[in-house]
Image (cartoon, rainbow, N blue to C red):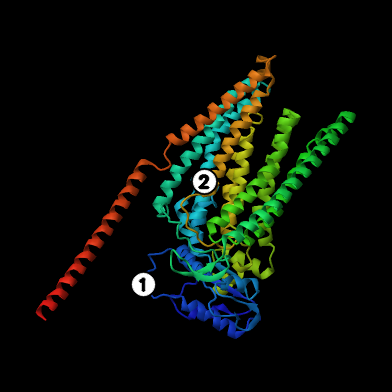
Amino acid sequence: MKVTLSALDTYESSFTPLVVIELAQDVKEETKEWLKNRIIAKKKDGDNNDDFLTMAECQFIIKHELENLRAKDEKMIPGYPQAKLYPGKSLLRRLLTSGIVIQVFPLHDNEALKKLEDTWYTRLTLKYQPIDNIRGYFGETIALYFGFLEYFTFALIPMAVIGLPYYLFVWEDYDKYVIFASFNLIWSTVILEVWKRGCANMTYRWGTLVMKRQFEEPRPGFHGVLGVNSITGREEPLYPSYKRQLRIYLVSLPFVCLCLYFSLYVMMIYFDMEIWALGLHENSGSEWTSILLYVPSIIYAIVIEIMNRLYRYAAEFLTSWENHRLESAYQNHLILKVLVFNFLNCFASLFYIAFVLKDMKLLRQSLATLLITSQILNQIVESLLPYWLQKKHGVQVKRKVQALKADIDATLYEQVILEKEMGTYMGTFDDYLELFLQFGYVSLFSCVYPLAAAFAVLNNFTEVNSDALKMCRVFKRSFSEPSASIGVWQLAFETMSVISVVTNCALIGMSPQVNAVFPESKTDLILIVVAVEHALLALKFILAFAIPDKPRHIQVKLARLEFESLEALKQQQMKLAAENLKEESRVSGKETET
């Protein structure tokens, strides 16, 4: 859109631009006027209190209002008869899919961003992140991710410290790994429960701990016949749930199963490559062929990353097509699809090596290769490559980037042109997924490769800074999203910790030292392994129950808040009842006089 935005600088001295709506170059004037009128119609008069809401909160409100612009009587977008509308259709979504609106994004606050960067990642020192400042600028969802990343990294340090001597001194002595594996299983439970308490502290401080989801509004992509919600009484699209269930079970589920089958097929090709490399090494025995032994695992790790990303696009399309009403339901179904595929795609080969081939040496080699390769690829794809592409824009954009880095104030026009060319941050989904898979590599086979935690710590220390750089300088500013917790990811991590109990107990039960104790009766060995596994699971659930999700002082404050709310409601009802009684007395007095 070739327009000069610098005219806005003289429009109003106190005007602070918050959100940019980029239109296509040839948008008709009647369309612009219609869109402007629809947006202005949503405006409500209110106090102009700049200190009451942060810039991120103001941008979130604008996004919320834009997403809830829905067609009423319009049959089409003015000036574009091919862009059909029907009652309840999201106007912003139709404008985006029709190419009339290119994108909508919030602007950075350069001064606030510079202050945040100075306290966050520009100085490479070992320190805690300014989580409250991150929340103030990016919102609760992103702040919770960085809080969890920091917490998880420090929680990995004990595992890394304990695992290092096991790796160096008692590599093949499997009976000593019982202590390490038991510590790992208790550790995985405790850190997740303690995180709940820390998360409750943060979100209570931010005012989002007791967010109500019962009356969550429809997501922008939800479509249906415009009707009246029987609970809220508001107009919104209505869509039969049976149609959604048919789409899930007749289309989405078979597609996911087909993808899982394809993932297993690729895994078998990988094992054929392993057999070929091993045979080549046994025949020649040279140093080059010993290096070649790692090539199949490296290739497979790269293929896994490619398949994960391709499947992610397909999962997003299917979940959107299922037409979920709530954003939380959409996210839950998307996460379930992606987690099932990623778990099988990343860990199926390790389970096959451990429990079918029973080759512990190959298991260690494959685990190390998959972990290190995936970490390197994620750093390149998520941070380094986007940053390099951002730096390779045209000469004019590069000059403006340098101007911003030199702390020279840019005009509004320059800032908009610069930021609209940046990539779009797609949310914390991929970041949590990376941590989830990393947690699986560390916990599932800890008794076989105890060095995994050390590699995870090293990766996460760089991940904190690379993700911070990505948020501040590589991607556009993302819209703030209020959150009370990390959501369904908490359940995903807890499920992974339960699975790790089973795998570690089974691996220890398969060790030669443990098998030597029961040389004749394998049934006794299996029964003992199952009993130990059940005992550890029981211990995990006892710990989870014994550690409260919210600290005591938070529970007291929430109870006091609920009590005060009920008291205020009771007083309001009593006041209203007294006024009604007074009015009735006044009316009856007039009737008596009459």
Where residue 296 sits in the image (x, y, percent)?
79, 40
Where residue 289 sits in the image (x, y, percent)?
85, 34
Q: Is residue 508 left or right of residue 359?
A: left
Tell me if mark 2 has few (under 14), some (14-19) or many (20+) residues whose alpha carbon lies within 10 angstroms of its own.
some
Pick the front one: 237 or 53: 237
What separation in Å lies between label 2 and label 1 (alpha carbons)? 36 Å
Q: Is residue 399 left or right of residue 138?
A: right
Q: Earlier in the sequence, mark 2 or mark 1?
A: 1
Pick the front one: 424 or 512: 512
Which residue is drawn at the image coordinates 44% and 53% (left, top)? 132
Q: Which residue has dot 1 on it? A: 47
Residue 275 drawn above or below residue 381:
above
Farthest residue toward the right? 283
Q: SS class of the residue under badge 2? A: helix
Q: Which residue has dot 2 on it? A: 148
Q: Amino acid at mark 1?
A: Asp
Residue 348 drawn above or below residue 213:
above
Tell me if mark 1 has few (under 14), some (14-19) or many (20+) residues whose alpha carbon lies within 10 angstroms of its own.
few
Q: Is residue 219 left or right of residue 316?
A: left
| Rendered image quadrant of residue 423 | bottom right
Pick the front one: 592 or 106: 592
Residue 452 drawn above or below residue 327:
above
Where residue 18 sits in the image (x, y, percent)?
50, 69
Which residue is drawn at the image coordinates 49% and 56% (left, top)? 116
Residue 520 drawn above or below residue 265:
above
Is residue 428 at all visible to an observer of this figure?
Answer: no
Q: Amino acid at mark 2?
A: Phe
